[in-house]
Image (cartoon, grey):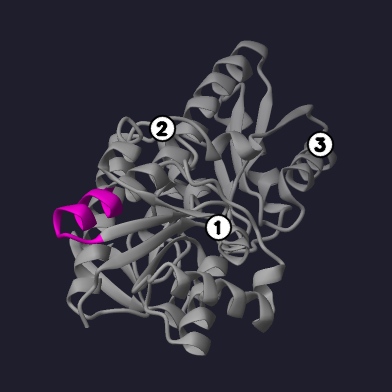
């Protein structure tokens, strides 16, 4: 099958680097004589037919921008067969030969059903700050989210040291502790709590007591939002177990925004170009990722059916260096 026109959309939560991926898809396709249709507001926009042609100039000066120029949304309509059928009809009207979906596992579910029910070739690009998709070492937006969180942790550490206080900082990661773990190591945290290891929250009491015994006047504790009880639960355990005052800082959606760092721009550019090449090679129904420095293809279903664990060596390292 000769690919003459593809579509691209961003779906789910925004992630720094999505614009770099869109740019790469548009410019790689154009260089190969393929037209690109941009779909605004994700699957909701596809259901409504909110689409237009994109050319190289339309994506100029976007590689450094956070968020997504195509906008994004979570669509309940797309969860129904009728909603997906209408979206497929819009793609056919636009003579689209394949769809690139930039997002996380929820977005890949939507793409998978579109392909299964209507035979439209789809390719996923991993766009989520959580880094929780099986089949790629890193996801688009992850590096920037870590840097954003780390910058906040560094500032809070200064305040904690000045006031001799314990700061409990919650970072994003509903189901995965990748951000929390990297931030804990880079930020020199005394302890980290992640969903992958639901160790008793009471363990923090011993950690804080040991820190005090060793002469540490302040402490930083990192908690992934998906850890049961979150930062508030960890802070309460500290106060109940030690009688010490804590301060809780929930970083929240600030981690989604901002200018993407170079690693995210490079990853997004490489994966966007690889998605176009995959279509040209007759590949579809996969997520294009990067594993051990090389482009990899993972069936969409595997991205949510198979579990991506945190790096256990890093987890051990974080504990070892907290002494």
Q: Magenta span has 32?
A: yes
Most common SS among magenta residues: helix
Residue in view at x 68 percent, y 81 percent: 82
The numbered mark, 3 or 1, whose residue comes first in the sequence reads: 1
Residue in view at x 48 percent, y 26 percent: 151
Q: Residue 97 at what x, y percent from top left?
A: 34, 74
Q: Which mark is residue 42?
A: 1
Question: In the figure, is residue 288 to the left or right of 37?
Answer: left
Local crowd at mark 2 within 10 Å, few (<14), some, or many (≥20)?
some
Give above or below for 2 relative to 67: below
Q: Residue 272 at what x, y percent from top left?
A: 28, 56
SS label for mark 1: helix
Most foreground residue, 46 or 191: 46
Most foreground residue, 148 or 315: 148
Between the C-alphas of marks 2 and 1, the distance is: 18 Å
Q: Residue 284 at what x, y percent from top left?
A: 32, 79
Between the C-alphas of marks 3 and 2, the distance is: 41 Å
Q: Which mark is residue 65?
A: 2
Question: In the figure, is residue 206 to the left or right of 111?
Answer: right
Q: Please say whether residue 322 is visible from this viewpoint.
A: no
Most foreground residue, 60 or 130: 60
Which of the two marks, 3 or 2, is nearer to us in this view?
2
Instruction: Evaluate if marks 3 and 2 touch, with contact meaning CB atoms under 8 Å apart.
Output: no
Residue range of the region highlighted in magenta in the rendering: 24-34
The numbered mark, 2 or 1, whose residue comes first in the sequence reads: 1
Give above or below for 37 relative to 308: above
Q: Which mark is residue 239?
A: 3
Local crowd at mark 1 within 10 Å, few (<14), some, or many (≥20)?
many
SS label for mark 3: helix
Q: Residue furthest front?
A: 93
């Amino acid at each position: 099958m000769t690919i003459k026109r593809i579509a691209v959309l961003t779906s789910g939560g925004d992630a720094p680097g999505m614009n770099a991926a869109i740019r790469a898809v548009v410019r790689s396709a154009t260089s190969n004589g393929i037209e690109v249709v941009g779909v605004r507001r994700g699957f909701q926009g596809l259901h409504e037919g909110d689409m237009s042609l994109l050319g190289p100039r339309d994506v100029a000066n976007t590689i450094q921008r956070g968020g997504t120029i195509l906008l994004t949304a979570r669509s309940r309509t797309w969860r129904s067969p009728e909603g997906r059928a209408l979206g497929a009809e819009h793609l056919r009207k636009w003579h689209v030969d394949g769809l690139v979906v930039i997002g996380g596992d929820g977005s890949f579910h939507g793409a998978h059903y579109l392909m299964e029910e209507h035979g439209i070739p789809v390719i996923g690009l991993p766009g989520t700050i959580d880094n929780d998709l099986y089949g790629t070492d890193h996801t688009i937006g992850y590096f920037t989210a870590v840097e954003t969180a780390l910058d906040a942790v560094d500032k809070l550490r200064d305040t904690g040291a000045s006031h001799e206080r314990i700061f409990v900082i919650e970072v994003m990661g509903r189901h995965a502790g990748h951000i929390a773990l990297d931030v804990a190591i880079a930020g020199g945290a005394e302890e980290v709590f992640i969903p992958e290891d639901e160790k008793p929250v009471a363990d923090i009491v011993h950690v804080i007591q040991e820190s005090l015994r060793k002469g540490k006047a302040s402490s930083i504790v990192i908690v992934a939002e998906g850890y049961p009880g979150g930062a508030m639960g960890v802070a309460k355990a500290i106060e109940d177990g030690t009688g010490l005052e804590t301060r809780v800082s929930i970083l929240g959606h600030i981690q989604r925004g901002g200018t993407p760092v170079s690693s995210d721009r490079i990853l997004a550019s490489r994966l966007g170009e690889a998605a176009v090449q995959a279509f040209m090679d007759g590949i579809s129904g996969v997520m294009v990722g990067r594993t051990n420095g090389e482009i990899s293809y993972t069936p969409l279903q595997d991205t949510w059916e198979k579990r991506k664990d945190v790096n256990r060596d890093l987890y051990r390292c974080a504990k070892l260096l907290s002494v």
